[in-house]
Amino acid sequence: MRKIYSVFKWEISKLFSSWQKAATLFLLPAVLLMGAINVFPLLINYLSTGSLNKQAVTVVNAPDSFIEYLDNTAKSRAFTYTFMSKSDFDVLNEDQEEINKRLRKGTIICLFSTGKENINFDDEVRRYYDLISNDQVYAQSSAKVLVAYDAYSITSQTRAGQFREAIIEDYQRTLIDRLGGDYSVVGSSLFETDNFNPVTDFLDYRTVANTSASRVVPGVLMIMMYYCVYSLVSDMFASERDRGFMAKLLMTPVKPKHIYIGKILAINVIVTASTCVTMLLLFFSSWLNRSNDAMSLLPFGMMLTPSELLIVLCTIPITVLLMTAICIVTVFTLNRMQDITVNLQLPLVYFLGEFFLQMVRSTRPVTFEYFIPLHNSLALIGETFMSQNKAWHTILIYLMNISIAIVVFTVTFRKEEQK
């Protein structure tokens, strides 16, 4: 055990002997991934609208209650607003090509209407609440909010959906307090809560953020883990073997088994720590994302319970162990360094594909997926963020990946010793 620890300590000290090397392994991949995740909304916005600005919303015939709502609501800052009177919009609407051009650029048009020119939106809502407060249960309102967007653009559809859910629907819920009059005091049977409730706000944000995180975080962590494992195995095994240093190392009084275990342990600890740093940056990125853009890969409020966090933290070293086994068997199976390098890079392409497939996937993993090595780790992390993982899934994945890694290590090193 002491010899294993000596090899482990020696490998760790080699890494930290150069701060540039340590930073390259610990921080550079995480920072690059974080940059890509945060640039993604800007890139999508630029490709679809030709602008890096926030989504533009043209508000037509805006009532005073809506303007007041925008001024007092933080989530409204995700959009930029241009206000236009109904008469100006009617003039603009005569040129249908101009309207279509604005919509194609990603502009959302929000129109407030009552169908009657002499009655504004707020007065119509007040009239409606006055009627139902006087027991006219069949009263109807002609107040309408119309949202126009480019139906042929997925980005515009997504942004319009965010605008409807985050702004319009929330604004509609506030109308009873702003314009409800007597009905909001004595006629309503709704259970009302304080305007600011940190618990419910946190849970609302967490639901949306974790749903998005379940599509993004697993792929990011898998790419990060394999990149680090690939780099370290190339350095500790492939390069040393190619230079002849590994043969000299095996001639020392330390048993080859102890040398291999010490190196594998060092790889696991280093990669696990690096992946945890990446996870920490992902959480920071989510909680600093106050704009909550509809295209954000990590919306505001991502959070795990202690038990869920423990599952993810336990999944990381087990997954790293199996990745290390796959890389090591590749190193000892092939002879030429260029062949080893190419074959070690192929799984990285696979994990990139997994990342993009997970991003667009809308269904839960089927049972068969839990029996696919490494892919089952990605599925488990995604299910954990969705709070839908099961105990038998977790136990099965842990036992399967550990067993496969041990078998691969045993067979590979036994063959190597027999050469």
Image: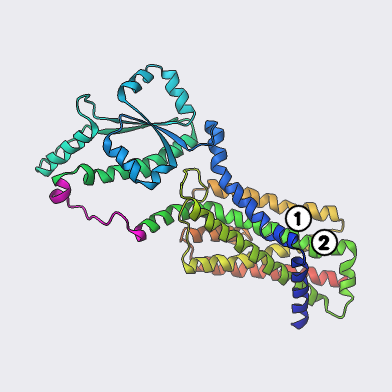
Residue visible at 13% across and 46% down in the picture: 182
Depth check: 135 or 28 in front?
Answer: 28
* Residue at the extreme bottom: 2
Camera sees residue 368: no
Rate crowding at label 2 as few (under 14), some (14 to 19) or many (20 or more) other CA atoms within 10 Å.
many
* Residue at the extreme left: 134
Q: Is residue 41 above or below residue 388?
A: above
Where residue 193 appears, as percent x and y from the top left, is 26, 57
Quadrant of the image for the C terminus? bottom right
Magenta residues span 183-200
Q: Amino acid at mark 1?
A: Leu
> Looking at the image, do the residues carrying marks 1 and 2 touch, with CB atoms under 8 Å apart?
yes
Q: Quadrant of residue 253?
A: bottom right
Residue visible at 57% across and 43% down in the picture: 40
Depth check: 346 or 20 in front?
Answer: 20
Residue 188 included in the magenta stretch of the image: yes
Residue 202's label in the rendered image is none
Where residue 4 appears, as percent x and y from the top left, is 76, 78
Residue where numbered disc 1 is placed: 344
Rounded to the nearest angstrom, the CA distance separating label 1 from label 2 is 10 Å
Q: Secondary structure at mark 2?
A: helix
Where residue 332 appears, as percent x and y from the top left, is 82, 63
| Left or right of 177 on screen, residue 323 | right
Residue visible at 75% across and 62% down in the picture: 232
Where residue 52 appears, as percent x and y from the top left, is 54, 36
Residue 396 included in the magenta stretch of the image: no
Camera sees residue 342: yes
Q: Quadrant of residue 377?
A: bottom right
Q: Is residue 175 above or below residue 272?
A: above
Residue where numbered disc 2 is placed: 238
Q: Amino acid at mark 2?
A: Ala
